[in-house]
Amino acid sequence: MSQSRKYQSFDFYRNVLKNAKYILAPMVDQSEYAWRVLSRRYGAQVCYTPMIHAKMFCDENHKQYQKEVWSTDSDDRPLIVQFCANDPEILLKAALKVQDHCDAVDLNLGCPQHIARRGHYGAFLQDDWDLIYKLINTLHENLDIPVTAKIRIFPEVEKTIKYAKMIENAGAQLLTVHGRVRDQKGHKTELADWEQIRRVKEELKIPVIANGNILYFEDIRRCIEVTGVDGVMSAEGNLYNPAIFAGVNLPVWQLANEYLEICKMIPTKIACIRAHLFKIYRPALPYHVDLREQFSQANTFEELCKISEELKGQYPENTVIQKDETGYKIFPYWICQPNIRLTENAKKNQEELMRKEKLSDENNKSTNDEPQVGVSSKSSLKIEELEKETESHNETNQTPIDINFGIDLMFEYNLERSNNKDS
């Protein structure tokens, strides 16, 4: 086996990944080649492919699947290909097919979806440490490039540390830690636990990447300061603002049309394109109900381009991002911004505030049928309410909510409760 590309640990991180701080997460049907091109344009330093099913990837009866999930070129680097698998030999066979066109192969140990439970892969391998060891070690012993892994945490930090060390001992040269447990998904998604990630980083001798709670560019610096990790991975934050790593929030139409231009050159599934556009345009679509409906029904690339152009014509070319009296940014609805999912306590606080505001509006007999530009009264939280929520999370050993983390709360933070596709 050639050792020319078989860098170990921090040599791999320095020489191949170039000490990357900004990393695009593997996302099912969402971190495809065209999206990686856009993300790299706006600062992503390392990209992962979508999770690839190793068995299907090796099956000659699934040619279309192979074509859809695997495409790249020499400019798409550094690139890490992620597989899900539960058979070491099949995983190796799949990895050998891509090792000459990527910089590492990653094992998905974090997917929490029901399909992963049925297929016995992803986070549902957490209970079978012997199998995980064999999967990683088989790649480590037989590939010409490094093997990495992406995990979720256990409720107990000591078990998470032991788990991470086992993966390191199996031969993983880099570990990404998603700071949520297996059951934290969909409507149960809460804040990621940065404290557990910090403890793992302290115990391992290989680079550690943090994943979770990255919705704003400022969260990256904060995460590195809190956890001491080597880099930070963004999934959902990138989907709603593909320029997150550049530290800018651009008009939704600008990034949507850039992505569509890339898709003209790189064939991409319509379902993927439509899903991306829905997320980019999410804050604006409540103001364009007719076009939202058209988006959901569009079946051709041309239809999607036409709808995007129609939306573009309804926004100002230049927008100045203002700040409220507390100094936090207020994004108009036509600017890319994260989709905030509040915790249960925060939702109750928000509902109470909305009830009080409604009573106040009725008492003042003031109504306004026109949508507001920027933050609407229905989507603003008072600082004192946020502080109460912060205290609540401190009591449960969750990562404290920073007032600027996900709390700039623009319009329609909870419009679309999409499944968490971060794998």
Image (cartoon, rainbow, N blue to C red):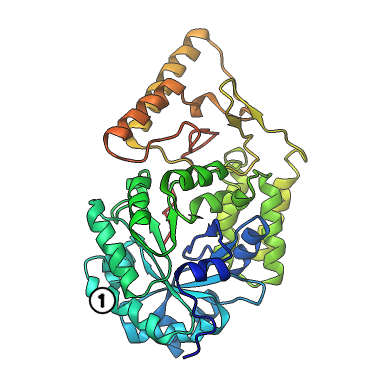
- Place of residue 2 in the rendered image (x, y in percent of width and height, measured from the top left): 50, 89
* Label 1 element class: helix
Q: Residue at x 36, y 54 (%)?
A: 202
> Which quarter shows the C terminus?
bottom left
Q: Residue at x 43, y 50 (%)?
A: 212
- Horizontal side of residue 153 vs 334, given as left or right: left
Depth order, front residue of 7/413: 7
- Horizontal side of residue 353 vs 45, given as left or right: left
Depth order, front residue of 207/328: 207
Q: Which residue is mark 1?
A: 131
In which image quadrant can residue 91 be found? bottom left
Residue lying farthest to the right in this orientation: 317
- Place of residue 103 in the rendered image (x, y in percent of width and height, measured from the top left): 54, 75
In which image quadrant can residue 319 be found? top right
Amino acid at the residue labelled 1: Leu
Depth order, front residue of 46/49: 46
- Place of residue 418 in the rendered image (x, y in percent of width and height, measured from the top left): 44, 51
Count of numbered tags? 1
Residue 234 appears in the picture as rendered: no
Count neighbours of disc 1 (C-alpha within 10 A) and say few if under 14, some if 14 to 19, many if 20 or more.
some
